Image: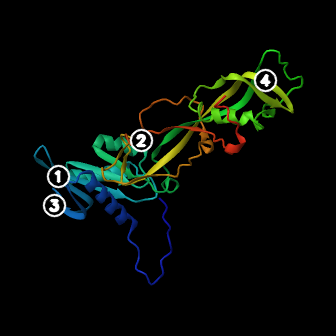
Amino acid sequence: MNRQMQQPNSSEAPSENPGVSLEKIVARIQQMLDPTSVVTHNEFLIDRVGNRRQYDVVVRGHFAGQPMLGIIECKDHNVRKGPAAIEAFAKKREHLGANFAFMVATKGFTEQALKLAKHDGIGCFSLLPDDPKQVGFSIGEYWYGSVFAWTTVRIALHLADGQSPPLEPWEPRALRYDGKPVINWIQQELHSTYQSECTPGDHTYVVTFDQPRTFNIAGHSYILTAIRFTAHRTRQNKKLWVSWSGDALFDWQTRQVAWPANGLLLSSDVDSDMTTWADYDGEIQEMEPWLGGVLQANFRGTFDWKCPSDHIPDLSSI
């Protein structure tokens, strides 16, 4: 998600306070998370001490037939919130007698703050950041992939009885049938029939003809009964960090994401060319998704091979 910010003209009305925007977004997501609750923004309540105080987001609902009251404090500051902010909010909640309390901080929380919040029963959340660099953290997961390729190809000829092998060394591309390089047909087979091969190493395949056929190498004809070719399969594991933004809250204490059923979740850009991803030396295994059960992505890719059809000999009928 990219947002283009422009400097307003002096004649324009000032934009909404970023802190107020955060409060409204949190209120909207909270309402989506529990549609049966009543969520209000910027409400003033009288606490048990008798003081009238402002609360960023107030949530009212029922659990087990009993009324429940929750409050959410929003902190749109340029630093991670420390224990002092948690301590002040815990006292504010105590004076009100709220059943639950959350704090949402744009840049997250310090370790000391998280420890104190756990002790005081304060939930610690952040919005999924649109720009991870701006807030100093990224919420997401690694995507893993394997890129397979066919590399070295060696060809062996099965000569008909009485035929002598070529005296001079020859390149695979020199072997032709019907005037077309046989290597083109082999590459087509490797990238179609044998494209699903996942085991690295050498793989040998044999094409046996119904009857001897005449092939050509550097202007010399040879009668063959079969062709054997060996190709080397390579595998390179890759990984890519994919960050998420959208209608969701990241729980710093459980390391999971609260994502409403109707919420919109957007990933960062993902290059479909996995060769550009970072190399990964480990094994790619089935694993639990880190992002609260949203997604686990494992991919398999191959290098494309293209050749005009009129450059490929037809060996399927022989």
Q: Which residue reaches farthest right? A: 168
Residue bearing mark 4: 223
Q: Is residue 20 above or below residue 165?
A: below
Residue bearing mark 1: 61
Q: Earlier in the sequence, mark 1 or mark 3?
A: 3
Q: Earlier in the sequence, mark 4 or mark 2?
A: 4
Tell me the mark number nearer the camera, choosing from 1 and 3: 1
Q: Which residue reaches farthest left? A: 65
* Image colouring: rainbow
Where residue 94 sits in the image (x, y, percent)?
22, 50
Q: CA distance from mark 4 to mark 1?
A: 86 Å
> Which residue appears at 45% of the width and 47% of the height?
139
Q: Is residue 194 above or below residue 57?
A: above
Q: Is residue 213 above or below residue 41?
A: above
Alpha-carbon neighbours of circle 4 within 10 Å: few (<14), some, or many (≥20)? some
Callout 4 touching callout 2 (CB < 8 Å):
no
Q: CA distance from mark 4 to mark 2?
A: 56 Å
Instruction: Find numbered disc 1 in the image and state the secondary structure of the residue it sits on.
Output: strand
- Image quarter where the C terminus lies is top right
Instruction: Find numbered disc 3 in the image and state the secondary structure of the residue it sits on.
Output: loop
Drawn side of residue 119 relative to residue 286, left or right: left
Tell me the mark number nearer the camera, choosing from 3 and 2: 2
Residue bearing mark 2: 295
> Which residue appears at 59% of the width and 35% of the height?
192
Q: CA distance from mark 1 to mark 2?
A: 30 Å
Q: Quadrant of residue 74?
A: bottom left
Residue bearing mark 3: 50
Q: Which residue reaches farthest front? A: 211
